[in-house]
Structures are given as C-alpha cells and as structure tokens.
Amino acid sequence: MNRTPDFTKSNGLLPCVVQDAETGKVLMLAFMNQEAFEKTQAERRATFYSRSRQQLWTKGETSGHYLDVMDMILDCDQDTLLLKVRPNGPVCHTGQDTCFDEQNEYSDLRFLEKIIQERKRNPKEGSYTNRLLSGGINGIAQKVGEEAVELVIEAKDSNRERLLDEAADLMYHFLVLLAAKEVKLDDVTSVLRSRHRDR
C-alpha cells in the first residue's frame, strides 16, 4: 500500500469493508484505529478496533475463524479501507457466512467449478461427476462434443427452456473437462481478457 490512511476524519477510526477475495461477497463492516491497521498490515490477519469495548480484537481469536488478509486497499479519500480476505469459516458471530445474512458463494460459474473440484478431491458414491472423471479424458471430451451439438440443434428452434437446459449441460461438462485437465475457469477467463485487450 503506497498511501497512508487518514485517521483524522472519524475520531481516529477507519471504516473497513471486508470482502472475500475469491467470491467478491461483502462479509462485514468493522473499524480500525491506527494500531489495528498496523497490526493487520504486519500480521496479514484482520484485527479491528471495538468501539463498544474500546480495545483491539482479532477476528477469530475465540472462534478460530480468522480472516487471512490478501489485500488492503484505501479509497480515493484515504479514509475508508477495503480489506480483501480469505475467511476460515463463518464470519458473523451468529454463525452465518456474512453479517448481512447472505451465503458466501460465487455468483458465477465458479460455484459449479468448486463443487466439481470437491467431487474430484472427495469422490462420492453414485456421483455422475465422479463417473465422468473416472471415465477419463476421452469420455468427457465426447460428452462435451455431444452437448455442443445438442445446444446447436436447440438454438435452431424457439424453445427457450430447452435451449437453457442444453446450455447448462454444455457448461457443466465443459467445467468437468477443465477439472480433468487441471485447468481453472480463471485461466480461460485470463485468455479471454487478453484477447479483449488486443481488440
């Protein structure tokens, strides 16, 4: 972090928006004084200032659900901090994922990628995903081809529901293929971003 936080605007406190570095979900809002800021920066584990107890507290010190800090970003006025973290469990004291009663999960295809990766690490009896993965690349690639053809066929008709079903089938099998090849969706996205810049 190149800039210095301005602790003078809110009685020595810096509002801190805490966001999951992977899902992008906002987890909580807390405050830091300069000591909490410096401790967090040094230890890379989120420490805040409790306004009610008037003391520092490290998130997770009693529950074990620490917030490992990936990045610390000041806003344009240098008086609000965005803390990108990797949570080690539910963030809210109520046991919820977030203090806003939301599920901390991906809002894009990575939610499905995460499920497929979990099946790969911990096979489940009767799982279609595990049957595909155990069948090898050729079988998975064949399914991707079949689903692509089925999507093309449905695209020529006017049944929106069938089109969506086939699109979902193709995306699922595509993600299984990526998992089998040890490739992440973010890797593909990076290629697309680079192509977009070139155009």
Image (spheres, rainbow, N blue to C red):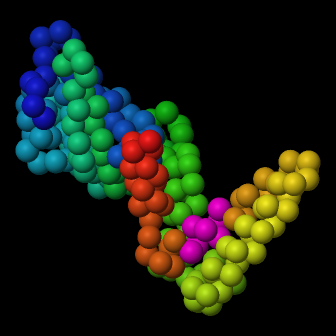
The residue drawn where x is 69% and y is 65% is: 170
Q: Is residue 53 left or right of residue 106?
A: left
The residue drawn where x is 49% and y is 47% is: 104
Above or below residue 55? Residue 76 is above
The residue drawn where x is 91% and y is 48% is: 158
Q: Quadrant of the C terminus?
A: top left
Q: Please state the horizontal and vertical placement of residue 46, each as a whole percent of the image.
A: 22, 42
Give the quadrant of residue 11. top left
Q: Is residue 173 magenta?
A: yes
Residue nearest the viewer, comparing 128 with 122: 128
Above or below residue 30? Residue 106 is below
Give the quadrant of residue 196. top left
Q: Which residues are magenta?
A: 171-177
What secondary structure characterizes most of the magenta part? helix
Q: Quadrant of the N terminus?
A: top left
The residue drawn where x is 56% and y is 75% is: 177
Q: Please state the horizontal and vertical placement of residue 54, each as a whole percent of the image.
A: 17, 24
Above or below residue 62? Residue 188 is below
